[in-house]
Image (cartoon, helix red, strand yellow):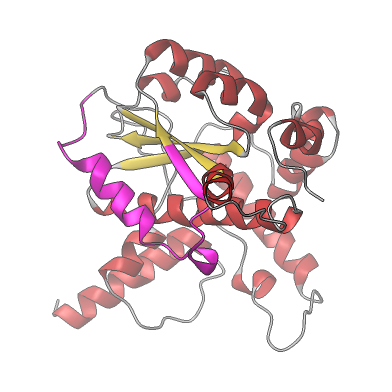
Amino acid sequence: MDGTTGMEALQAAALAARYGGAVPQAGPWNATIAGLLGHRSVRGYRPDPVPPGTLATLIAAAQSAATSSNLQTWSVVAVGDPATRAAMAEIAGGQAHITECPLFLVFLADVSRNARLGEAEGRELEGLPYLETFLVAAIDAALAAQNAVVAAESLGLSTVYIGALRNDPTRVAKLLGLPPGAAGVFGLCIGYPKPGAEGEVKPRLPQSVVLHHGRYDAGAEPAARAAYDAEMSAFSRRNEMAADSWTQRVIARIGTIRALRGRDHLAATLRSLGFPLR
């Protein structure tokens, strides 16, 4: 098998794993794209420490992400204290990987630094209390974290995001000693997977559902969703998960207020943490 044929085979396998039966047209390919398509969330970690300097490298990668107007309205807390981790695992509904991974980070939407800048310079930052500023901060944090994830996985590490920290942002803020204007938007576990915890690449919606040309068109969505439901049901059975479809998962996750697990109060909580959201 020559190099080109081997690359094409790897590309075909990666696309099939990510899309199941709705494989898009093959295009340009390289190791970076292969790594991105190979992403999977890992929820079981060995205690092995990450190599020295890994945290600084991941933060350098995170800080290399785009940031709106170079405002850099995000921060991150590396949480090592076992008691703090245990409390966060409790907040997140008992996710044990928070306590067992060698590196656990909490990414913050953080406008407090710029607020301090304004105070030091004797300037009122009139735009600081608005929803736009919080949205910029949350997006900045997400972009930074995704850069860190890509960097970690390129080093042979595994990751999983912990959005369930938003179940109780007030308690997270107290645990981390956050100032007003800083809130944890998600956590990130990083480490080496336990044997058998590596998981399988989870299929995504067909590109025909998420990619629109010129104008938004959902005409093909019902048939594509039905096919994707079948893919996800099969994935769940293979991975010993509840054999439900994507449609059922969406309904279970956002079909009731109870399923939000306290996040229905998020706007009020953010206001109490120093984000007026005007």
Q: Residue at x 58, y 20 (%)?
A: 174
Q: Quadrant of residue 215?
A: bottom right
On the rendered structure, is 128 left or right of 37? right
Residue displayed at 43% across by 47% down: 40
Question: Farthest residue in the front direction?
Answer: 122
| Residue 193 point in image, percent of width and height | 31, 33
Residue 276, x across and y down, in percent: 77, 43
Is 121 contained in the magenta span?
no
Residue at the right extreme, as displayed: 256
Left/right of residue 20 with respect to residue 100 in the rendered view:
right
**Vertical relation: 34 (above or below) 121:** below
Check if residue 51 falls in the magenta segment: yes
Task: Check the image and report above or below for 12 versus 37.
Answer: below
Outermost residue toward the bottom?
214
Which part of the image, by quadrant, shows the N terminus? bottom left
**Magenta part of the protein: which range?**
48-76
Which corner quadrant of the image does residue 166 belong to?
top right
Rendered position, 71 above or below 268: below
- Most extreme residue toward the top is 83
Which residue sits at x=68%, y=61%? 227
Residue at x 54%, y 65% (from the top left corner): 68
